[in-house]
Image (spheres, rainbow, N blue to C red):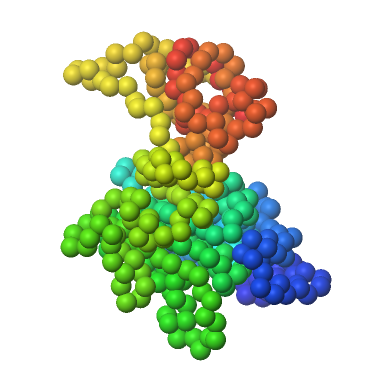
Amino acid sequence: MSNPFAAALSQLQVSAPSTPAKLIPQASPVSALAHSWQSMKQAAWTASSIELECIDKIQQTMNVVSLVFRPLQPQLFIFKPGQFVTISVAIAGKNYHRSYSISSSPSAPLTLELTIKKVDNGKVSNYLVDEFAIGDCIRVSQPLGNFNLIDINADKYLFISAGCGITPMMSMATFLTDSQVSADVAFVHCAQAPDDIIFNDRLRHWLSPKSHAGLNSQRNDYQRSLSFVLEHGLESVSEQGMRDDDGIHWGYGRISLKHLQAAVSDYRERSILVCGPAGFMQALQSMLHYVGFDMARFHQESFMPATESAPTLTADGINPNPVVKLMSQDASVQLHQGDLLLDGIESLGLPIIAACRSGVCGSCKCKVIAGEVAQSSTAPLSEAEINDGLVLACSSRLLTDVTIALV
């Protein structure tokens, strides 16, 4: 049996730069970040699909787990912090595909961590949280996504997340402070209640690594701040919030400009990266725009964008919208105007991957040969693909009879 540690070491040795990296005295966060990425990207993860084995399962909250994986073949997990992967997992003999942001950092490249929240009626998320076990395997695609530290330049950062939107933020915050210990990073996380804070212990260690690890470090230039905004459990806290003995700022209610001002007084000077439910991000965007924030420094990511609602049924459970037909080369099905293109494709049993199911990952591209659809997202599509008639099946609703071809 091969030794996985020897294989990992061999991969590290092969990927190591041939000349020592030069030190950057008093480098700015941007230059230090760029330097770290330049020294790592030659070993970047380029395999289109690899098989991973789960080596740990960590219960973060009652309905959130982190799954830690190692590769079955030598592979360093070098990716842009903030990116996501699409997984393929077999459940009851059928393969399912879903996209999840990576919560680990490429500064610890021997393992990959995905953090998953159990959602109502979520076939894959429920399986991964409740049944997936250490020793089980999945396949993952090459990481993708423009919401990442490498493609977003900044001098000072403010990460704002809600719920499981903290996943890519944890990856970015870890890599950023691993690359430049004195990086100026403020982190604001919103949750329902104290028990719902994902990465609670990890964030506390990130905020004050010396005190939590018992290190005898002489560094005193940490520029990190942490704030939690909770909807329940802090009813006695004033609107301006409070700061505890560990330096963590606590706010009560839904996030507001007063929360931001109290927790991160210089938020207007920072680049703001946001991840969470669509309504959460839209509210933040509106608030910041209202006070004149430079929206060129506002960046967001979400696997739950706003979409057109499904049609309302009559009291008899009948869809009142006109009947339309979805056609492919070998089959057709009757649907209703306003139905989701993806639902029709899946009802035909056609082989389509719908990983994020929210217009982000681009795995469900298909071509509309004839007919019209209403699109709520084209984000992953290039201009050439749009001009060629490609759409995202998960974000397109039928307006007329439609003929499609899978790509």
- Quadrant for the N terminus, please: bottom right
Decide: is 43 above or below 393. Answer: below
Q: Residue furthest front?
A: 292
Residue 370 coordinates in the image, percent (x, y): 57, 13
Q: Nearer the viewer, residue 179 or 110?
A: 179
- From where the camera sits, is residue 127 visible? no
The image shows residue 278 at horizontal and vertical percentages of 39, 41
The spot of residue 319 in percent (x, y) is 29, 17
Residue plotted at (64% across, 66% down): 28
Q: Using residue 136 as the reference point, say whether residue 241 is left or right of it.
A: left
**131 in relation to 174, above or below:** above
Which residue occupies the foreground of this view, 311 or 3? 311
Q: Is residue 44 visible?
A: yes
- Residue 140: x and y in percent read 56, 51
- Quadrant in the picture for the C terminus: top right
Q: Nearer the viewer, residue 268 or 94?
A: 268
Q: Is residue 145 left or right of residue 126?
A: right
Q: Is residue 386 left or right of residue 376?
A: right
Rendered residue at 32%/42% (across/down): 121
Residue at 35% from the left image edge and 50% from the top image edge: 257
User: Which residue does the image show at 35% across and 60% down from the upper left?
Assistant: 262
